[in-house]
Image (cartoon, rainbow, N blue to C red):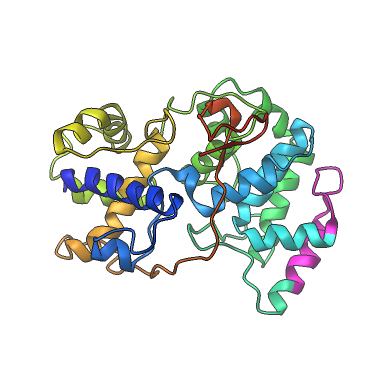
Amino acid sequence: MYDLYWYFAWERQNIFIRKQEGQSPPWTKDPILKQYKFCNSYRVNDRVSQYLLKNVIYNGKVYSKEDMLFRILLFKFFNKESTWQLLEQELGEITLKTFSIKKYSSILETAISKGIKIYNDAYISCATKAYGYDRKHDNHLALLEHIFKIDQAHLELLNAKTMKDAFHILKRYPLIGNFMAYQLVTDINYSDIVSWEENEFTVAGPGSERGIKKCFIDKGGLSNEEIIRYMYEHQEEEFLRLGFDFKRIGNRSLQLIDCQNIFCELDKYCRVYFPELKSNRVKIKKKYIPKKGKIEYIYPPKWNIKGDGDNYEKRRYF
């Protein structure tokens, strides 16, 4: 199981590289990876993260720090490209100044009445009636108003010195648990409105916890987060030990967020590969369906990833 973790990270990245090089499918001989949908080894390469980067953060327009933070949190609460497109279509430029619970709610309610899904089911956002509304989206809109207009906690977030400080600020609010707060601060840190050290800390999500449990009979007294850090710190020697030529994004190794995610994907992979390792999830829900068109990948400029020779300020392509 431990070696399988490194194999999965290596082969999933190989699939990504082969697709980007324009090779014809199948991009792997692995029957499980061919049949089912798995996230990339690098979280930033997943479709929703790329949409966030290209359309919410680095879309060529200039925003205030407050507006950028608002845009990121709004997008991530729904985590669905079509929902963002719907709001832009109806509202125009999305900024904090034009935010209205009533107006946003009306647009989303109309979409729901037409049978349109407004939430991404990649991870389940909390659905409690924290602010007294029956609809989940109304509670999330009220949460945005609480953060930005009532508490003005966005100022605290923008002044936070570390990712962990920002994590604890978000954790104060209903509808935001440990895993969601960690995902949110990771996405905020994609932008240039903050410059937090991203490998300062990590949080193991439910899927990651299942993967760790399958991977280790005995954790040796380590927490789940300490195990994730161990994988981050020992990745080079483990890839070398197993003879896996892991191809990085530029000079960027797998980060803590990526190592956390890979445990989650390992849990899914093992539902087919090692079905005798039981958990509360027994099947992989989504089959892999190739999408047409080549994605032009971009990365936060502060990562200084070497691109294809293009010289630009806001976007770096791999």
| Residue situated in front as seen by the camera: 55 or 80 | 55
| Residue situated in front as seen by the camera: 309 or 306 | 309
The percent coordinates of residue 62 (x first, y second) are: 79, 35
Q: Identify the magenta region.
A: 91-110
Name the residue located 33 percent from the left edge and 35 percent from the top edge: 225
Q: Residue furthest top?
A: 161
| Residue situated in front as seen by the camera: 226 or 63 | 63
| Residue situated in front as seen by the camera: 117 or 294 | 294
Res 34 quadrant in image:
bottom left
Name the residue located 53 percent from the left edge and 35 percent from the top edge: 308
Res 153 quadrant in image:
top right
Q: Answer yes or no: is residue 132 visible.
A: no
Judge from the rendering whether residue 116 lies leftward or rightward of residue 205; answer left or right.
right
Judge from the rendering whether residue 203 lies leftward or rightward of residue 280; answer left or right.
right
Res 172 quadrant in image:
top right
Q: Tell me if residue 187 comes above or below residue 226 in the rendering.
A: below
Label count reads 0
Residue 106 among magenta residues? yes
The percent coordinates of residue 315 (x first, y second) are: 63, 36
The percent coordinates of residue 269 (x first, y second) are: 27, 59
Residue 66 among magenta residues? no
Q: Answer yes or no: is residue 257 visible.
A: yes
Name the residue located 71 percent from the left edge and 79 percent from the top edge: 114
Name the residue located 68 percent from the left edge and 62 percent from the top edge: 83
Judge from the rendering whether residue 251 lies leftward or rightward of residue 296; answer left or right.
left
